[in-house]
Amino acid sequence: MTENVRDKVVEIIAEQAVLEVEDVKMDASLEDLGIDSLGLVESIFAIEEAFDIQVPFNANEPEQSDFDISSVAAIVGAVEGLVAEQKGG
Amino acid sequence: MRRVVITGQGTINALGHDVPSTLEAMREGRCGIGPLELRDVERLSVKIGGQVKGYDPEALFNRQQIALYDRFTQFTLIAAHQALDSSGLTFTGDLATRSGVVFGTAGGGVNTWDENYRSVYEEGKNRVHPFVVPKLMNNAAASHVSMEWNLKGPSFSVATACASSNHAMGLAFQCLRSGACDVMVTGGSEAMLSFGGVKAWEGLRVMSKDACRPFSANRNGMVQGEGAAVFIFEEYEHAKKRGAEILAEVVGFNMTSDAADIVMPSKQGAARAIAGALADGKLNPEEVGYINAHGTGTAANDKVECAAVADAFGHHADELMISSTKSMHGHLIGGTGAVELLACIMALKDGVIAPTIGYEEPDPECALDVVPNEAREAEVSAVLSNAFAFGGLNAVLALRKAP
């Protein structure tokens, strides 16, 4: 499951950044990958659709959202948490 | 050059069903934002808005009219009635052919789209009411006003998202100043508080779930509103000759495009529009005492707008007052500039500056006098109204006290 979440999140981010999956490093920030605010909102939408979850994220206060977007690894971790919480693991 | 004055105003919005009740709410810093009452609201994650409450269309329109008038058209006709009644104008002969209508709306008949999509997609019906198209079209409101009051000159609608009304009123101003027309009925309307209308905004993740707090450090997004405001713009000599009561003078207008990003605002584009409106109105920056801000309550708009005002006004930015009445009536999208012009006229005519309510924490990036929480009495001789739309389209109006 964990592997699947990571692979799927990386795939979504890679598509948004127009990069190969191998080029999305886990410690990269979205800024490093060239994803802007609109790209971020679109990525979150794709994550919600892929995992059938609700992601709590307000673009006005990204730092105050429970959803950590500081790096690819952080996003994967946050999605794993939400999947466990909302889909019972 | 021909001068342009305002000789009538009308409105219906979350703060009131007419101008006096709306201005009273603005003076008292009352909030018109509350829980949304609409079908399927439980499926929305944003459940608040500046909704027009206590509204009964059947008391105002007959069955045939309701079959033709979307909610945005109803709001427009209500506001237009008040504005035209207060102006004392009737349109016959040459005046009819030299008078027109220009209204802003971003979505037009959103409720009509919503209801009919529901019936064909959700309920599987294969037939819709014959008036769906004339009801939902963006120009429906302008057309019904032209028909109702016999306005036979140029009539059209303008859709530039959140700047629609300012663009509309600016074009009305230019029609009069250029000599093409003598009277223009102008303003704007929006009725986007339907399930689909709110759901679409939710998707962008810029909406607040609790309140609109422009310029406050803890702001967390915009809140939608609905309603309309309509004004009578009239050539000055024409108004003077008939002894009309003049509410204010429109002196300048400027529009610019950021040519940059579809949603993120640009300081340069906004500052150029502000400076352009001052130049068009032959105003010195020091003459401007008040700005009705675009002030959406999003992180991005408010700091960019304050930086643009600082750029355009230099040291005078610290002397003037700037408030966002969206904190009270919500963001009427294409109708917002029209309702906000009411606050501009109140500032000039009554010497009352509408507040920015919900203001809780200073933001160093919005370090201007935002008239927090309480209205203020102040004599001002010139004001601006800002509107900065998604798509990077900026429109700023400049007004002076009545001559």
Image: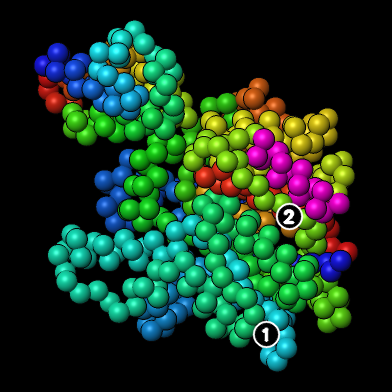
- Residue B321 appears in the figure: yes
Label drawn at residue B97:
1
Q: Earlier in the sequence, mark 2 or mark 1?
A: 1
Residue pictured at 81% horizontal, 44% vertical: B289
The image quadrant of residue A68 is top left
Residue A85 is situated, as x and y percent measured from the top left of the image, at 19, 22
Residue pictured at 16% horizontal, 63% vertical: B123
**Which residue type does callout 2 highlight?**
Phe
Disc 2 designates what residue?
B253
Examine the structure image and report whether residue B174 is included in the region drawn in magenta.
Answer: no
Q: Is residue B95 above or below residue B349?
A: below
The image quadrant of residue B318 is top right
Q: Is A5 in front, or is B45?
A: A5
Residue B231 is situated, as x and y percent measured from the top left of the image, at 67, 67
**Which residue type does callout 1 highlight?**
Thr
Residue pictured at 55% horizontal, 37% vertical: B260
